[in-house]
Each structure stands twice: as C-alpha cells, then as structure tokens.
Image (cartoon, helix red, strand yellow):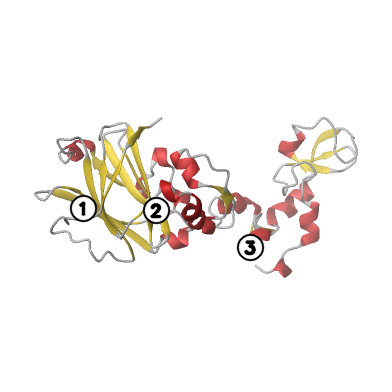
C-alpha cells in the first residue's frame, strides 16, 4: 500500500506513550482519558502523561480503529515499504529483509561479534570480518563429519559464488537430520538447490532439495519440511573405520550440473568438520 493509504494522524494516536509501539488490544485508559497498552499498564503505577490513576476501562472505539488500521513495517526507515493489519506485523518482522539481525557466525559458531545488520548485508560482513571462520569452495565438494556419533551437531559455513551457506547436520534421535541453509532473504534462498550423497562407491543415499533460508531454521530443532531425515542405523552403515561420515555436497542455482546419481564423484575438494554436543 502507498503512503496515501496510511492515516498518519490515526497512527500517532495509536502509539503507546510507554513502549512507543502501536498499541495492541486491549487498550486501557487512565482516569483522564489517556490511552496505554494493556501490557504496559501492568508495569506502570500511574499514567505517564498526567500521573493520574489507571482504570480498568477499555477504549473500545480506539480498539476498533486499531483492528482495522493499516500499519507500516517497523523497518520503514531502513527501506521496507510493506504495510499490514496489526495482527500480521509480528509475522512479517520474523522474515523482513530489513530487520536488524545479529551476525549468524556469532549465534551459530559462538564467535564473539557485535555486528548487527540487515539480511542482505550478512554475506558481505562474513566475507570482510570472518574469512578465517568460513571456507570458500566450488559448487561441488566433499564434507567429512569427524567422530560421527549420535547426540552431536555438525556445522560448516561455506562461501559459494560470494553467498554464505551452512551445512547443518545432527542426530539426537533415531534420525539423522541435515540440510544446507542459505544465509539471506527467503526469495534469494529459493533460487538455490543442494544435493547430498552419503555412502561409498558400492551403495549410498542421495537427496536433492531446495535450500531453506536461515530465517526459517532453528539449528537445535530442524523442522521436517526444511531438512532431510535418514534413519540413524542406515547412516551408521556408511561411517568409515576411522569414525567419519563422508558427504558429497553440491550447491547450485536451480539445477545441479555435477550431481550424478549413478556414481560418487572422486577427487573432490575435501573439508572436515568437528562435532559439538547438542544441548
């Protein structure tokens, strides 16, 4: 929606004087008629506008306006032009490309980093600051999961074509879950696919899927629709005598040119990743 459809005067009236956010229902009033969020009212002794006492009366008229008003995204100044009904704002913020976020290297690898920025700036930040924490690889490579045991998680950041991806694998239950996550906006992630082959030349398991966005993934609890699950006992058949699991991985835009199911590729670049305990 355009600016002409946003009633800025009404939106000003809907700002809570305490949290400065738009007031969600219920909207309460003080004895002199000033409005406040229901949640903020519980934290205040007196009205911040007039120091009057609060009542339990709701401002039904303003609530009706609030339920039908069109609101701008909180990241409007950063560039987001989306507008919503109040019930849809928080859902949008969880995926908004203009929402300020922490460095994913900090949250995923527990690396000290105070950087925050938008999703579109993450790859540039990783390339500039965390080059030694990631490995730049061609689209086709071999990942070796060392000391493969149940109850651990395996994480590996990979730069491909200037874009950041994370291999995530874990086996806390009877299933081994894995995925290749694109760090970036959802619409950009949809352009990438990944393929994984686990096994040896005699027999293997091969899967191809679209890369999910890191905005859709919680590492400790990978959702089924965003990852691949294989029975843990099946995976154990492919663990080497040295205790590592070899995964042939390819990342590509739309299609995977080198991902041939009839055979495993040899002489691919090899990257090893150690495991860590899952809390």
Q: Residue at x 84, y 34 (%)?
A: 54
> For this rendering, which residue is in front, 32 or 128?
128
Residue 227 location (% of width, % of height): 34, 48
Spatial CA distance of label 1 from label 3 is 41 Å
Name the residue: 68% across, 69% down.
2
Q: Nearer the viewer, residue 58 or 19?
A: 19
Q: Position of residue 163 (x, y in %)?
A: 42, 59
Image quadrant assignment for residue 168: top left
The first of marks 1 and 2 along the sequence is 2
157 sits left or right of 120 in the view:
left
Q: Is residue 187 left or right of residue 144?
A: right
Q: Which residue was labeled with disc 1?
A: 206
Mark 2, residue position: 165
Q: Secondary structure at mark 1?
A: strand
**Closer to viewer: mark 2 or mark 3:** 2
Which quadrant, please, contains the N terminus? bottom right
Give the CA separation, mark 1 to mark 2: 19 Å
Residue under label 3: 79
Label 2: few (<14), some (14–19) or many (≥20) C-alpha neighbours in 10 Å: many
Query: In the rendered image, which quarter is residue 114 located in?
Result: top right
Horizontal placement of 199 versus 172: left or right?
Answer: left
């Amino acid at each position: 929606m355009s600016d002409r459809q946003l009633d800025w005067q009404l939106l000003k009236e809907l700002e809570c004087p305490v949290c400065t956010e738009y007031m969600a229902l219920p909207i309460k009033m003080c004895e002199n008629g000033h409005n406040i969020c229901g949640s903020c009212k519980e934290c205040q002794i007196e009205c911040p506008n007039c120091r009057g006492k609060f009542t339990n009366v709701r401002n039904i008229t303003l609530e009706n306006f609030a339920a039908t008003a069109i609101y701008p995204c909180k990241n409007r100044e950063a560039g987001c032009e989306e507008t919503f009904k109040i019930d849809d704002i928080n859902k949008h913020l969880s995926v908004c490309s203009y929402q300020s976020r922490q460095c994913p290297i900090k949250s995923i690898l527990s690396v000290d980093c105070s950087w925050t920025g938008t999703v579109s700036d993450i790859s540039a930040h990783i390339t500039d600051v965390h080059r030694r924490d990631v490995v730049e690889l061609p689209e086709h490579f071999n990942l070796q999961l060392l000391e493969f045991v149940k109850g651990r998680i395996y994480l590996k950041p990979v730069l491909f074509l200037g874009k950041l991806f994370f291999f995530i694998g874990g086996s806390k239950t009877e299933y081994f879950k894995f995925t290749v996550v694109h760090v970036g906006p959802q619409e950009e992630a949809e352009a990438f696919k990944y393929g994984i082959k686990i096994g040896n030349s005699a027999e293997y398991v091969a899967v191809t899927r679209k890369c999910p966005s890191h905005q859709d993934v919680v590492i400790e609890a990978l959702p089924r629709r965003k990852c691949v699950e294989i029975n843990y006992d099946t995976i154990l058949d492919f663990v080497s005598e040295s205790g590592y699991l070899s995964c042939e991985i390819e990342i590509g835009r739309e299609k995977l040119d080198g991902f041939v199911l009839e055979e495993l590729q040899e002489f691919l670049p090899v990257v090893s990743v150690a495991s860590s305990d899952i809390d």
